[in-house]
Image (spheres, rainbow, N blue to C red):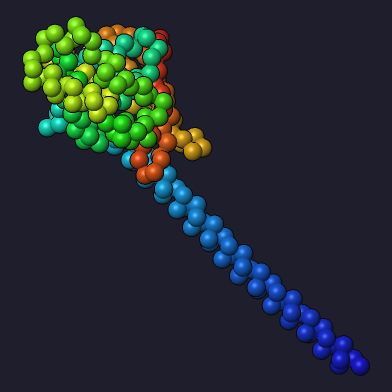
Amino acid sequence: MKNTFNNMIKILVILIIITLIMWIIFYLLTKKDDIINKNKNNTNSDANLNIILEELTTIFSYINNKKESDIEACNYLGKDIGYEITSNEDFFKYYGPIIMDCINNQNYVKIKFEDNKNYKIATNTEVEFYKEYFPKSSNFQLLKNIYTLEDMLNFNEEEMEELDKYIDNNYYGMYIINEKAEENKINYEIKRIYKDNEYYEIIIKATNNKDIYTGNFKIKIENNHIQYLPLKFRLNKNDLS
């Protein structure tokens, strides 16, 4: 009887030891998977940050006239396009179409608007594609609602035929290229990029003469590309540097 009891104790101890070993192995494997997943997420996050930083650096290098390109739109980013930093308007409402034409090399069709000014225009498909990148900064008009009779008085017959073709095919006006535009005088600097849930928060410092402005906006990685949300600036009396 005593031997039977001892044997049962031994079996019970062995079962307990086996259970503990199995639990430890399971715990270690689960922890390892968790670490792998965390590292994978961190790697993805870092990769997104690198993509965002690279694209923003390129954009503001063109705007600050520190970079040149063979693409007309990229060089035009360095011009005064009429955006007033004190207006409390969305920066991308003005710059978005030019950025899209530059970074994604859209090569929008260019037609005459008036003397020394041309219009970059796009199809409805191109406009919808633009909205995937700048969903809050798109409000484009059809050409038939842009060109007035007065605008067309200086058009010759060939130019009128070309314009009619694009009007009939429902093209939209994206942005104007002013051949006499002066260089942009506002300097933009990326101060900070950080992750905020599914978005990345970007802080921008803008210097206009001696005035310093701060702007912040959100970016989202959508379908493997950057999606920009509105950017507005406010006067900041404290230098961010």
Tell whether 32 sits left or right of 212: right
Q: Nearer the viewer, residue 168 or 141?
A: 168
Tell whether 113 sits left or right of 99: left
Rendered residue at 13%/22% (across/down):
161
Is residue 83 visible to the viewer in this orientation of the structure?
A: yes
Where does residue 146 sit, x and y in percent of width and height?
A: 27, 15
Within the image, what quadrant is residue 104 found in?
Answer: top left
Q: Nearer the viewer, residue 51 or 189?
A: 51
Is residue 60 visible to the viewer in this orientation of the structure?
A: no
Spot the residue most to the top: 150
Tell whether 144 sits left or right of 219: left
Q: Nearer the viewer, residue 91 or 122?
A: 122
Q: Quadrant of the C terminus?
A: top left
Rendered residue at 34%/12% (across/down):
85
Rendered residue at 41%/25% (across/down):
136
In this picture, is 9 found above or below 84? below
Within the image, what quadrant is residue 240 found in?
Answer: top left
Q: Nearer the viewer, residue 220 or 131?
A: 131
Within the image, what quadrant is residue 178 found in?
Answer: top left
Where does residue 48 sit, x and y in percent of width and height?
A: 38, 42
Q: Quadrant of the N terminus?
A: bottom right
Rendered residue at 31%/10% (across/down):
84
Q: How many numbered dots are placed on residues in this image?
A: 0
Tell whether 213 sits left or right of 155: right
Where does residue 163 sit, x and y in percent of width and height?
A: 17, 21
In this picture, is 2 found above or below 71? below
Where does residue 39 sit, x and y in percent of width and height?
A: 46, 53
